[in-house]
Image (spheres, rainbow, N blue to C red):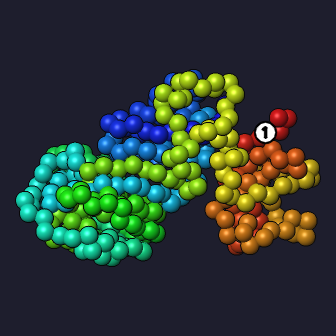
C-alpha cells in the first residue's frame, strides 16, 4: 500500500499526531506528511504511506491555499489565538475599503520575517524553544510570494480572507503584518488549509472517514496512488532498452531516441514510466549534462 491520503486534519492536534493516527488505522510501516499545519489549524494535510513517503518533498514545494480569520485590535506573542495578548485596542474604527487596500499591499513577492514561535532553528535549537524561555534572536527576512489574496467577510473585530501563497509563508505573520499596516494590531484567529497544488479540501477524508473505508482496495475520494498524486508532473514512457538503466538509478542520456519537450526540461520532476504505464521512477532533467537524473526509483529488477 503505497498511497497518499488527503486528510482533513482536526483542530488541536499536531500534524505528527495526525500522521501517527493514519499510520495506525492503515497499519502502515512508514508514514509522513508533506508540510506541517499548526495545532490550531485545520484542513488539508497530505499523508504519504510507505514508499510514497519518498514523494513528500515534491508536494512541500507546491503553492498552498488558506482560508484565514484574523482578529483586529489584538497582538499576541505567538501571532495567533493561542498566544499571550501583548497589546489590545478597544476601539476599531476601520472600514472594509481600508482593510481591502491593506490586504492588496501584500500581493506579490514580499519579505517576511519568520516568527519566533516556529520550528526554524537558530544554532541547532528550534526558535519556539528559545521563545518559551523569553529569548528572541535576530531572524533573516525571507522572500515569499502571495500569489492571490481576497477579502471574504468583515465582522469586526474579525476579518476573513483567502490567500494562495508559496512554500514557507507564515499566515500568522501575514496577519501580524496586516495589523501593523492598519495601525491597530492583529493576530490569526482561525486557519484552514484548503488546497495544496491541485488537491483541494473537498477531496479530503477525516480520520473517522478513514476508519470506515476498505483499505484493502484504496481508491476513490481522498486516496491517491503515487502516479495519480503526481499527475501535475509530465510523464515520460521508456522502452525496454532503457528499463535497466532506470531501475538501477542510472541517468538517461537525451538523444534522437529519447527526445524531451520544453515541459519536461522545465519541470520540477518527470514521471518515468514503462511502455505500459507502470511508474518506475521520478527523474529530473539536467541541462548542464543533457540527461535525466533519477531522484527516486520505485521498481527494482525482477519486479
- Front position in the image: 261 or 106: 106
**What residue is drawn where x is 43% and y is 44%?**
43
**What residue is drawn where x is 57% and y is 51%?**
199
The N terminus sits in image quarter: top right
Q: Position of residue 226 (x, y in %)?
A: 67, 43
Q: Residues within 10 Å of mark 1 (few under 14, many from 20)?
A: few
Q: Could you tell me which secondary element the residue under label 1 belongs to?
A: loop
**What residue is drawn where x is 40% and y is 60%?**
162
Is residue 276 rendered to the left or right of residue 290?
right
Give above or below for 143 relative to 41. Answer: below
- Visible residue check, residue 173: no
Is residue 99 rendered to the left or right of residue 294?
left
Is residue 72 rendered to the left or right of residue 45?
left
Is residue 167 rendered to the left or right of residue 258?
left
Mark 1, residue position: 300
- Visible residue check, residue 185: yes
**What residue is drawn where x is 52% and y is 53%?**
196
Q: Position of residue 264 (x, y in %)?
A: 73, 66
The C terminus sits in image quarter: top right
Amino acid at each position: 500500500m503505497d498511497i497518499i491520503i488527503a486528510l482533513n486534519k482536526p483542530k488541536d492536534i499536531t500534524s505528527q499526531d495526525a500522521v501517527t493516527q493514519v499510520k495506525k488505522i492503515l497499519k502502515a510501516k512508514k508514514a509522513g506528511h508533506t508540510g506541517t499545519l499548526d495545532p490550531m489549524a485545520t484542513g488539508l494535510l497530505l499523508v504519504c504511506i510507505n514508499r510514497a513517503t519518498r514523494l513528500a518533498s515534491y508536494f512541500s514545494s507546491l503553492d498552498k491555499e488558506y482560508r484565514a480569520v484574523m482578529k483586529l485590535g489584538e497582538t499576541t506573542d505567538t501571532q495567533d489565538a493561542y498566544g499571550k495578548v501583548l497589546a489590545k485596542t478597544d476601539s476599531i474604527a476601520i472600514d472594509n475599503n481600508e482593510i481591502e487596500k491593506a490586504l492588496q499591499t501584500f500581493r506579490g513577492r514580499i519579505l517576511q520575517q519568520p516568527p519566533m514561535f516556529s520550528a526554524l532553528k537558530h544554532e541547532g535549537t528550534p526558535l519556539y524553544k528559545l521563545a518559551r524561555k523569553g529569548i528572541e534572536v535576530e531572524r533573516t527576512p525571507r522572500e515569499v510570494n502571495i500569489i492571490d489574496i481576497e477579502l471574504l467577510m468583515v465582522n469586526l473585530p474579525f476579518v476573513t480572507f483567502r490567500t494562495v501563497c508559496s512554500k514557507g509563508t507564515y499566515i500568522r505573520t501575514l496577519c501580524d503584518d496586516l495589523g501593523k499596516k492598519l495601525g491597530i494590531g492583529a493576530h490569526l484567529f482561525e486557519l484552514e488549509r484548503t488546497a495544496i497544488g491541485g488537491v483541494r479540501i473537498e477531496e479530503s477524508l477525516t480520520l473517522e472517514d478513514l476508519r470506515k473505508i476498505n483499505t484493502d482496495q484504496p481508491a476513490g475520494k481522498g486516496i491517491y496512488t503515487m502516479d495519480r498524486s503526481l499527475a501535475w508532473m509530465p510523464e515520460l514512457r521508456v522502452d525496454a532498452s532503457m528499463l535497466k538503466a532506470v531501475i538501477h538509478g542510472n541517468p538517461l542520456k537525451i538523444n534522437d531516441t529519447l527526445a524531451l519537450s520544453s515541459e519536461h526540461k522545465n519541470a520540477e520532476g518527470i514521471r518515468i514510466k514503462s511502455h505500459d504505464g507502470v511508474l518506475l521512477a521520478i527523474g529530473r532533467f539536467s541541462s548542464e549534462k543533457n540527461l535525466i537524473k533519477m531522484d527516486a526509483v520505485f521498481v527494482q529488477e525482477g519486479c
